[in-house]
Image: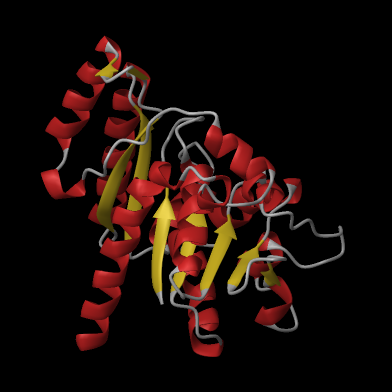
Amino acid sequence: MLTITSTSLSGGQGKTTLIYFLGKKLVSKGHKVLVVDLDPQHNLSTYLRVNVDRDDPSCLEFIQGNFNSVADCIYPVEEVKNLFIIPSDEGLEIANDYLASSGFGIVKLRNQLDLVKNEFKFDYCLIDTPPQKSQLCQTGIGASDYVCVPVETKSKGVICLDRTLDAIETLNNSKIINTKLLAVLPFRDRLFGMNRSIEGKKALEQISSRIEPERLLPPWVESVQPEKAVNRNITLEDIDFGELSHPFDVLAEQLEQLEQSEQLV
């Protein structure tokens, strides 16, 4: 099971959107996928129409190990075969204090996901993190084999990318984890006809200068269509805008290649 975390240390950069569309893309290609909603705002759980009752185990109980069976924390996404979620709710916020006091909070989620690996046959685990350098964000990064960083093609996005890459490097320097950067997704790329905005062009140049060329995904063009798809819990292909999925096609192919190489080792 390859574990990929979507993280970006600022709000509105596309973390949850990336996990939503990537998860559905991988499922459409025949893979069994688990997504983990590590954000107390629980947008991913809401998008996928998975809401838990107060007494039902969710991501908080999963992190704390407060369950009878790990299967109790994993819920199927209705109408999407082979897509499952460990959902979140507002109560997850207290996990930050729990992780801070647990000693090795950075590897807590990774250790819990090892239980999933041993019991289930998921091909991929995709983790959505909160938009700040919290204990939850750090344990999400620590649980992953690879990190994807979505950032807006604006000056704010460039600053966010710098902060996020620095945070990943700092965590890796602890020698406790070894999380690799898989990809950066330029998000909400604004086009006017065939021309990119001046701000977007400058931001994309700055983003490109900070990473290796093979880490840069095709920019995701700004459009109202993804929001329409999310609101209906469907894919872009379902509303005949599959061309907007190109960045996720590329990312899914990269993950399949990594999965194959892992199996050969």
Task: Choose top left, top right, bottom left or bottom right for residue 210.
Answer: top left
Q: In the image, is 3 to the left or to the right of 86?
A: left
Rendered position, 19 above or below 118? above
Q: Is residue 211 above or below residue 237?
A: above
Residue 175: horizontal and vertical position, in percent? 25, 62
Q: Position of residue 102 (x, y in %)?
A: 55, 62
Along the line of sight, which residue is nearer the eye, 117 or 230? 230
- 21 left or right of 98? left
Res 115 visible: yes
Q: Position of residue 115 (x, y in %)?
A: 54, 82
User: On the rendered image, what quadrant is the C terminus found in?
Assistant: bottom left
Farthest residue toward the front? 240
- Of 232 and 106, nearer the camera is 232
Coordinates of residue 21 in the picture (x, y in percent): 49, 51
The colour scheme used here is secondary structure
Quarter of the image containing the N terminus? Answer: bottom left
- Seen at 16% across and 33% down, the residue is 208
Residue name at image x 27 percent, y 18 percent:
196
The mark tally for this picture is: 0
Please tell me in which quadrant of the rendered image residue 53 appears.
bottom right
What residue is drawn where x is 32% and y is 42%? 167
Q: Is residue 176 visible?
A: no
